[in-house]
Image (cartoon, rainbow, N blue to C red):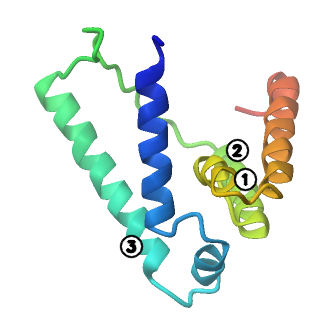
Amino acid sequence: MRNIKYLIIGMLFGIILIKSQVVSWFRIQEMFRLQAFHMYGIIGSAIVVAMISIQIIKRFHIKTINHETVVIHDKKFHWGNVWGGLIFGLGWAITGACPGPLFAQIGSGFLVISVTLLSAITGTWVYGLLRDKLPH
């Protein structure tokens, strides 16, 4: 019962993903084929909202719900991030899903997406196994 708020927020997030058609494989294919602005508009809106939110957090020193200070570290450029992003994008283009929409798609009844979820979990496990050997 303690984590019910996270379940409710997750369900609301899933409903938003479904209603905005972000979980639609056809919308994702349109994006990668540069045929529609729909996904770019949603992703661009999310980036703008994140930028504004981070600026508000930094300027007003907003704390977490548990009254902890929010610390946002500066990021250093590393080519590993570029390669990781390319691999992530390739997987997204092939499967039509990234981690957030995976659960919304499964919740919508597309159970074949379970294969993609298991593949994502396996990829994360392999990364954790090889992390010390990869350049960071």
Q: Given the image, on which type of amino acid does mark 3 rest?
A: Gly
Of discs 3 and 1, which sits in the foreground? 3
Which residue is identified by label 2?
80
Which residue is identified by label 3?
41
Residue 77, percent across and down? Answer: 54, 43
Q: Is residue 130 above or below residue 46?
A: above
Tell me the crowding category of disc 2: few under 14, some 14 to 19, or many 20 or more residues within 10 angstroms, Cα based: few
Figure quadrant of residue 73: top left
From mark 2 to mark 3, how far is it between C-alphas?
A: 27 Å
Q: Secondary structure at mark 1?
A: helix
Q: Residue at x 78, y 46 (%)?
A: 117
Q: Is residue 13 above or below residue 25?
A: above
The answer to the question of whether label 1 and label 2 lie on touching residues, with beta carbons closer than 8 A, is yes
Q: Residue at x 71, y 49 (%)?
A: 84
Instruction: Work out whether residue 4 can be spotted.
Output: yes
Is 105 positioned to the left or the right of 18 in the image?
Answer: right
Q: Secondary structure at mark 3?
A: helix
- Between disc 2 and disc 3, whose residue precedes? 3
Q: Given the image, on which type of amino acid does mark 1 rest?
A: Trp
